[in-house]
Amino acid sequence: MNKFLFLICLLPVLSFSQENNSRYTFDINNFYGKILNHTEEISQFTDHSPEGFLISINRKTYGEKAWQSRYNYPDYGLSFEYQNMKNEELGYFYGLYGHYNFYFFKRNLMLRIAQGVAYNTNPYDVNTNPENLAYGTHWMPATYFMLNYKKERIWNGLGLQAGVTFFHHSNANLRSPNKGTNTVALNIGAVYNFDSKESLNYIPNKDSIKFTEPIRYNLAFRTGFNESDLVGSGQYPFYVFSAYADKRLNRKSAIHIGAEFFMMKYLKGSVWQLSHAPGSTISPDTDYRKAGVFIGHELFVNRLSLETQFGYYAYAPLDYLPPIYQRLGLKYYLMDEIFMGVALKTHAAKAEALEFGIGVRL
């Protein structure tokens, strides 16, 4: 806490070049929270209260590009996380994120969505740390959401913000174990504007013509590595081939409908293990491959988009996971017809794979 207060005292003396400095803010937040008990394997850790801080640099938008005014002039930036899990087995987290800040209620309510990568200092080790079933790797994808009341420029560019933050850390089954942790925390912090006066005006939304576009067809290929829940079973590649149609509803949104084929190589070994389990009715010749159908939604923010899909396995001889699956991902359009992305495929709260993909939109 003393370090946090010291950093707050330093904020007013920080400065950028006077040119365009009203576009930038710096904030630091201290947080104190609770690990949610989402599975029995981590219940032993939920009595502890993690704490830490977030440091962020933000760039304001004023509507020079049309997407900025559509989303009420969000900020975008980078943030650094330090989190002490307050447990020797779980260790500490250091994370680096890219984020967007979205504003509501006369810009007093801020919702931050952040995605990045985090480093854990003490993951599972069969010999030195067998109790940590939450993280199987040092490095892992990570996400946090922040909902804050925010008041800027209270005094000489210095403002305050406070609210609640949610952190999710897990390695998406890159390696087992992978129970993950979810931390809900209260945060309070200071925000500093590098210009004490708002010197730029917001450019109003000029989207006067209704946006229309015909149905477009997409082909996507996704791949990566993952491991079964059996610790030490090994990492295997997977391949996903998807074909779907999308229809833009407006400048922000599109809906999807499609089908896809899964070759999850880790399941090939699972067939053998399950077929040899006592009392098993599974044949060792059971096909491990799957095919699914899905519907989805895509939210466009500049060249980035947020993709949400819900699917059902229409073909799944191996009854290993629930028949309904979900996908949450980020896409970046290199051009109008070509995109790349990363997505998390899950079955409810159970992550199965971190997918890296590339595709075309015809």
Image (spheres, helix red, strand yellow):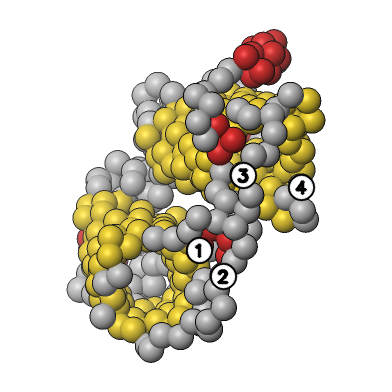
Disc 2 crowd rating (10 Å Cα; few below 14, some 14-19, many 20+) is: few
Q: Is residue 75 left or right of residue 121?
A: right
Cα distance, mark 1 to mark 4? 22 Å
**162 w.r.t. 106: above or below:** above
Q: Earlier in the sequence, mark 3 or mark 4?
A: 4
Which image quarter is the N terminus in?
top right
Assess disc 3: are there few (<14), some (14-19) or many (≥20) residues with their C-alpha within 10 Å of its C-alpha: few
Give the quadrant of the C terminus. Answer: bottom left
Going by the numbered disc 1, the residue's amino acid type is Ala
Q: Amino acid at mark 4?
A: Asn
Point out the frontmost of discs 2 and 1.
2
At 58% from the left edge and 61% from the top edge, which residue is drawn? 69
Pointer 1: what residue? 66
Q: Are dots 3 and 4 in contact, CB under 8 Å?
A: no
Position of residue 201 in the picture relative to residue 255 (left or right):
right
Task: Give the residue pinned by disc 2.
Answer: 206
Which residue is disc 3 drawn over? 200
**Residue 108 numbered mark, or none:** 4
Residue 118 location, x and y as percent?
44, 34
User: Identity of the amino acid at label 2?
Assistant: Lys
Answer yes or no: is residue 102 visible: no
Comes first in the chain, label 2 or label 1: 1
225 lies left or right of 23: left
Per the model, the C-alpha gap separating discs 2 and 1 is: 7 Å
- Residues under labels 3 and 4: Cα distance? 18 Å
Q: CA distance from mark 1 to mark 3?
A: 16 Å
Q: Residues within 10 Å of mark 1 (few under 14, many from 20)?
A: some
Q: Earlier in the sequence, mark 2 or mark 4?
A: 4
Q: Residue furthest bottom?
A: 214
Q: Nearer the viewer, mark 1 or mark 4?
A: 1
Q: Are marks 2 and 1 in contact (CB under 8 Å)?
A: yes
Check disc 2 and report its element: helix, strand or loop: loop
